[in-house]
Image: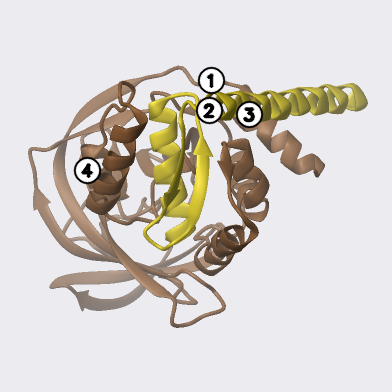
Chain colours: A yellow, B brown
């Protein structure tokens, strides 16, 4: 039972991981919702997102985790 | 990828979408506390402080960071923005935002607690039952003009010394501390890593809102496990959220997290 659960968990997580990475790649190729920005403490990153709200929320989250 | 990380991702992202609810309550009292904490347990000079707000209503209390409350008040809907607008707004809003390490909101009713907290931009809610076994002593002293009595307890891996006042017969306090026969005026752990001190107490007509809209329901144990996994695997977690950065910048983020997030208030989760 445990093995079945663990296997299903692995499959689901792997699917999600690849789905997320593929989405980002597609967005990146289309040039939609991708931007490079620098936080107030000088960390530079490029972010890809599927909507403006998601991008903004992640930019703010990144600022807080990388600087404070 | 370790098993724990996989399980956390699944538990926290795919299971138990919480039934969303919003409850508005009128506060009767408003207390402002300072929190002074050691961000890095290995550096005695890493102390930081913030102001925290405790709303006390008839049924519930709400405890949250003053800065976090302000940041939420200026948060707007960005769904119809262009990328150029968003970059401009990020620059101005990130300037306007006030820095906080405490994004949680803690709602208490009797000894039941509902916590809404974030890991990065993901919102979670969990319920907690706190049974603090207070030991009240005969020691007294005056703090902030209030005559206070001493009480001690253990909570999540730390021993705390609290000073409460029966001049304000309200069994509330900062963070998850309550259940004494008077408002907690000061509470600190015995290693002085976290100190809460009452700055002001007044009547108010403000409303406060319990809002778990968009939050994923989880358990306290899973939340803290996922938080810990997020910190330890920050590079991988950021790539999952669509971030790309070079090694130099990745190292900056890792160093900052190591410096600022290695001394959580709760160090032993049951």
Q: Residue at x 31, y 30 (%)?
A: B210
Find out whether the residues at labels 1 and 2 contact each other: C-beta distance under 8 Å. Answer: yes
Please provide percent x and percent y for residue B111: 42, 41
Q: Secondary structure at mark 1?
A: loop
Q: Residues within 10 Å of mark 2 (few under 14, many from 20)?
A: many
Circle 4 sits on which residue? Answer: B56
Q: Name the foreground residue: B74 vs A6.
A: B74
Could you say which quadrant of the image residue B47 lies in?
bottom left
- Tell me the crowding category of disc 4: few under 14, some 14 to 19, or many 20 or more residues within 10 angstroms, Cα based: many
Q: Are marks 1 and 4 in contact (CB under 8 Å)?
A: no
Which element carries disc 4, helix, strand or loop?
Answer: strand
Q: Earlier in the sequence, mark 2 or mark 4?
A: 4
Chain letter of disc 4 in the image: B
Q: Mark 2 sits on what residue?
A: B217
Task: Please tell me if label 1 and label 2 are on a single chain.
Answer: yes
Residue B97 position within the rendered picture, expressed as x and y whole percent measured from the top left: 26, 50
Nearer the observer: mark 3 or 1; the answer is 3
Q: How many other residues sit within 10 Å of disc 1, few (<14), some (14-19) or many (≥20)? A: some
What chain letter is assigned to the residue under label 2? Answer: B
Residue B55, relative to residue A7: is it above or below?
below
Labels 3 and 2 in the same subunit: no
Disc marking residue A25: 3
Parent chain of label 3 = A
Badges 3 and 4: C-beta atoms under 8 Å apart? no
> Would you say B126 lies left or right of B208 here?
right
Viewer-nearest of discs 3 and 2:
3
Q: Report the disc number at residue B158.
A: none
């Amino acid at each position: 039972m445990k093995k079945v659960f663990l296997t299903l968990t692995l499959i689901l997580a792997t699917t999600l991981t690849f789905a997320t990475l593929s989405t980002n790649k597609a967005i990146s190729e289309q040039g939609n919702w991708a931007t490079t920005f620098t936080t107030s403490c000088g960390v530079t990153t490029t972010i890809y997102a599927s909507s403006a709200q998601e991008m903004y929320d992640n930019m703010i989250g990144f600022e807080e985790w990388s600087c404070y | 990828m370790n098993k724990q990380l996989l399980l956390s991702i699944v538990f926290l992202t795919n299971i138990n979408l919480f039934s969303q609810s919003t409850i508005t309550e009128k506060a009767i009292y408003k207390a402002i506390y300072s929190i002074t904490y050691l961000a890095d347990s290995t550096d005695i000079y890493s102390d930081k402080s913030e102001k925290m707000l405790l709303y006390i209503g008839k049924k519930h209390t709400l405890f949250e960071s003053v800065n976090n409350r302000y940041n939420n008040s200026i948060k707007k809907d960005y769904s119809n923005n262009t990328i150029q607008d968003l970059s401009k707004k990020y620059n101005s809003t990130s300037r306007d935002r006030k820095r906080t390490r405490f994004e949680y909101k803690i709602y208490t009713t009797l000894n039941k607690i509902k916590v809404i907290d974030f890991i990065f931009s993901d919102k979670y809610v969990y319920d907690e039952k706190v049974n603090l076994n207070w030991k009240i002593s005969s020691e007294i002293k005056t703090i902030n003009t209030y005559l206070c009595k001493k009480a001690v307890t253990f909570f999540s891996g730390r021993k705390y010394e609290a000073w409460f006042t029966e001049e304000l017969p309200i069994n509330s306090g900062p963070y998850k501390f309550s259940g004494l026969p008077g408002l907690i005026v000061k509470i600190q752990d015995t290693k002085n890593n976290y100190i809460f001190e009452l700055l002001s107490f007044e009547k108010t007509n403000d409303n406060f809102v319990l809002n778990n809209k968009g939050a994923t329901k989880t358990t306290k144990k899973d939340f803290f496990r996922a938080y810990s996994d997020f910190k330890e695997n920050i590079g991988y977690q950021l790539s999952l959220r669509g971030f790309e950065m070079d090694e130099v910048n990745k190292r900056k983020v890792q160093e900052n997290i190591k410096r600022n997030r290695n001394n959580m208030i709760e160090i032993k989760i049951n």
